């Protein structure tokens, strides 16, 4: 179970290969990569072009929250390992923001755990996002669809 919050970009292939080759017990690797979109789809300036997206976090608290999300996924599914890399700082369209990867003996466990981690990360992890567009800057609000996705995992 590994968490990184960093400014630097990451090599998806290298990270997945490292995770995949860690154990001969691994039969499945599921991953998600999120990147900065060119256009907003949330808020008052719907469809406005994004120049940059700045992600802020509270060091220490953010890593702890991500580790707790990973631990919860491990308690629900039989996963062998997971990886979360989340970038902070100022990013441009097409820049990678997040990598979530999960390995397990079987694909179902890995798919469920990866989706769970991403849904909780989107709604529960302490990150703040500010978009800079041609119309100015604005903080990104939580989306109702993210809250709905989270509800499927409530016990």
Image (cartoon, rainbow, N blue to C red):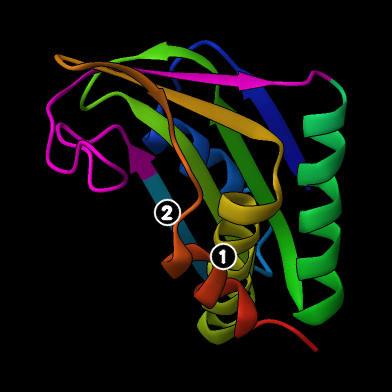
**23 above or below 132?**
below
2 and 27: which is toward the camera? 2
Identify the main secondary structure in magenta. Answer: loop
Which residue, given by chain and number where applicable, does mark 1 sit on?
114
**Pointers 1 and 2 in contact (C-beta within 8 Å):** yes
Q: Residue sitting at 56 percent across and 39 percent down?
A: 18
Which residue, given by chain and number where applicable, does mark 2 sit on?
32
Q: Residues within 10 Å of mark 1 (few under 14, many from 20)?
A: many
Residue 138's spot in the image, x, y percent?
Answer: 39, 23
The quarter of the picture where the C terminus appears is bottom right
Q: Tell me, yes or no, whether the highlighted magenta stretch contains residue 37.
A: yes
Q: What SS does tag 1 mark? A: helix
Residue 27 in view of the camera? no
Displayed quadrant of residue 134: top left
For the record, the magenta segment spans 34-59
Q: Tell me, yes or no, whether the highlighted magenta stretch contains residue 100.
A: no
């Amino acid at each position: 179970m590994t968490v990184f919050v960093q400014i630097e970009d990451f090599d998806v292939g290298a990270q997945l290969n490292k995770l995949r080759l860690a154990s001969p017990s691994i039969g499945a690797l599921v991953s998600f990569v999120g990147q900065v979109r060119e256009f907003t789809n949330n808020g008052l300036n719907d469809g406005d072009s994004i120049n940059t997206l700045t992600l802020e976090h509270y060091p220490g608290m953010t890593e702890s929250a991500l580790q707790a999300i990973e631990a919860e996924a491990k308690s629900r599914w039989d996963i062998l390992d997971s990886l979360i890399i989340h970038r902070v700082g100022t990013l441009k369209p097409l820049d990678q923001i997040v990598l979530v990867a999960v390995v397990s003996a079987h694909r179902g466990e890995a798919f469920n755990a990866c989706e769970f981690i991403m849904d909780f990360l989107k709604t529960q992890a302490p990150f703040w996002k500010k978009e800079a567009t041609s119309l100015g800057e604005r903080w990104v609000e939580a989306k109702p669809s993210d809250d709905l996705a989270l509800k499927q995992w409530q016990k």
